[in-house]
Amino acid sequence: MDFLIPEDLKDLKNMVRTFVRKELMPLEEEVERSGKIPEEALQKMRELGFFGLTIPTEYGGSGIGTFGYCLAAEELGWAHSAFKTICGVNNGIGSKPIVLDGTEEQKRKYLPKIASGEYITAFALSEPGAGSDAANISTQAVRKGDRYIINGRKHFITNGPLADLVTVLAVTDKEKRAHGGITAFLVEKGTPGFSVGQIHKTMGSRGVYHSELIFDNCEVPAENVIGKEGMGFITAMKTLDDGRLTLAASCVGTAERLLEMSTEYAKRRVTFGKPIAERQAIQWMLADSATEIYAAKMMVYATAIRYDKGERIPAEVAMTKLYATEMVNRVADRAVQIHGGMGWIQELPVERIYRDVRVTRLYEGTSEIQRIIIARNILGYKGGLEG
Ligand SMILES: Cc1cc2nc3c(=O)[nH]c(=O)nc-3n(C[C@H](O)[C@H](O)[C@H](O)COP(=O)(O)OP(=O)(O)OC[C@H]3O[C@@H](n4cnc5c(N)ncnc54)[C@H](O)[C@@H]3O)c2cc1C
């Protein structure tokens, strides 16, 4: 599929690939054991510009676009999920609201810090009472002169405990909600009334932190509104389109690694006098995984190229997210099966990856929500989910 990739992006993909294999994959056990990405690795990622790959060059990033970032995400997908998450948020949901709809002043103030990795970011939409039904959030922002007072509680927020800057979605007009009544605000760490609540314990993805964020009469200046009051839901949906594509790309990389591990293991493992690779039952699992990876990769490349051309294609983005995330879960399941008992033992990374990929079907919109977006598009329904 190299024919789809321009030369400069091929170089970038190769650079990320080399770095991931040489510098990040050897650290996986340490991340899993300590629950932390070593500071040295973070520093190397900052120096290589990993935190600002998608941020426009005039604001200190590399401006490689969504397709370019998908290629990087595919390579990062080979390594422990903590690595792709920490740079994925700064390149995606943590910066996109500003890149897409922020004011010039916001771009100048924040994007260089996000691109350099000085600032870690987060995107706070979900709440205990509103996940899939995102327009139903109850966090409120009330205008008082040139300030807004935010009250409410977000949860599951990736990078929540670490974030220096958070995009927070809040209701500014209860009647209008998704149709002009939700606003996006920038809230900096240390703002009075803003605090981190419970840090969630999770099934996988050690080294990534998710938490509640509490807003208790948190005051922000009106200049912290992203775009215009009431436009926040559209900003959020556009941001999620980008995040869904890059997530799908990372799933392709993870699945490729699982297939490589499964293939090598199948050639090595001998039962009843022959390598299991010679058994049709195993070959079919490998063949099914390879076919699904190829399909997902084509979907990611084609959809990301169209997205970068400015096409608004939420249904195709949803199809890509749905297919790639379900695909990597099937590939992980087959990888465990091919490895037999070794697939369930923590000695090999298969066990960890099997746990880590499960969440991809839940966040950035569950599989069911992607199907709803696709079906509405087929049926010609208009609704809040597509933005
Ligand atoms: C690890 C992790 C990281 C996350 N990071 C962030 C983040 O950084 N920022 C953020 O804002 N959010 C984040 N989230 C939240 C995530 O986006 C939500 O979990 C997700 O949108 C689903 O919402 P929910 O968990 O409330 O499930 P619910 O909406 O309660 O859904 C429960 C089940 O019902 C199904 N369902 C819901 N509605 C329908 C329907 N109409 N038809 C059919 N089925 C339906 C769902 O698909 C799901 O299977 C994160 C979540 C996780 C687990």
Image (spheres, rainbow, N blue to C red):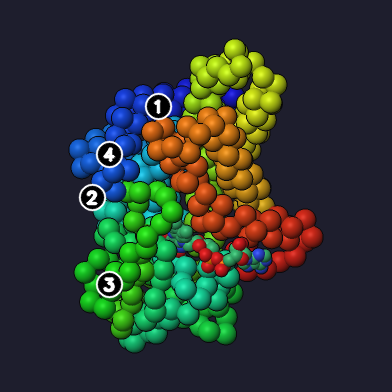
Mark 4 neighbour density, 10 Å: few (under 14) some (14–19) many (20 or more): few
Asked whether, in this view, residue 68 is left or right of residue 59, the answer is right
Residue contact between numbered discs 4 and 2, judged by CB atoms under 8 Å: no
Q: Earlier in the sequence, mark 3 or mark 2?
A: 2
Q: Which residue is mark 1?
A: 17
Q: Which residue is mark 4?
A: 30
Residue contact between numbered discs 1 and 3, judged by CB atoms under 8 Å: no
Q: Which residue is mark 2?
A: 118
Mark 2 neighbour density, 10 Å: few (under 14) some (14–19) many (20 or more): few
Marks 4 and 1, how far apart at CA: 20 Å
Q: Earlier in the sequence, mark 4 or mark 3?
A: 4
Q: Residue at x 64, y 25 (%)?
A: 282
**Beta carbon at label 4 within 8 Å of ligand 1:** no
What amino acid is at disc 1? Answer: Arg
Name the spot of residue 187 as percent of width and height, x first: 31, 68
What amino acid is at disc 3? Answer: Ser
Name the spot of residue 262 as percent of width and height, x first: 53, 26
Location of the C terminus by quadrant is bottom right
Q: Earlier in the sequence, mark 4 or mark 2?
A: 4
Q: Earlier in the sequence, mark 1 or mark 2?
A: 1
Residue at far right of view = 379
In depth, the one of 276 and 320 nearer the eye is: 276
Asked whether, in this view, residue 288 is left or right of residue 210, the answer is right
Location of the N terminus by quadrant is top right
Mark 3 neighbour density, 10 Å: few (under 14) some (14–19) many (20 or more): some
Marks 1 and 2, how far apart at CA: 24 Å
Q: Which residue is mark 3?
A: 195
Asked whether, in this view, residue 350 is left or right of residue 216, the answer is right
Name the spot of residue 28 as percent of width and height, x first: 33, 36
What amino acid is at disc 4? Answer: Glu
Q: Nearer the viewer, mark 3 or mark 2?
A: 3
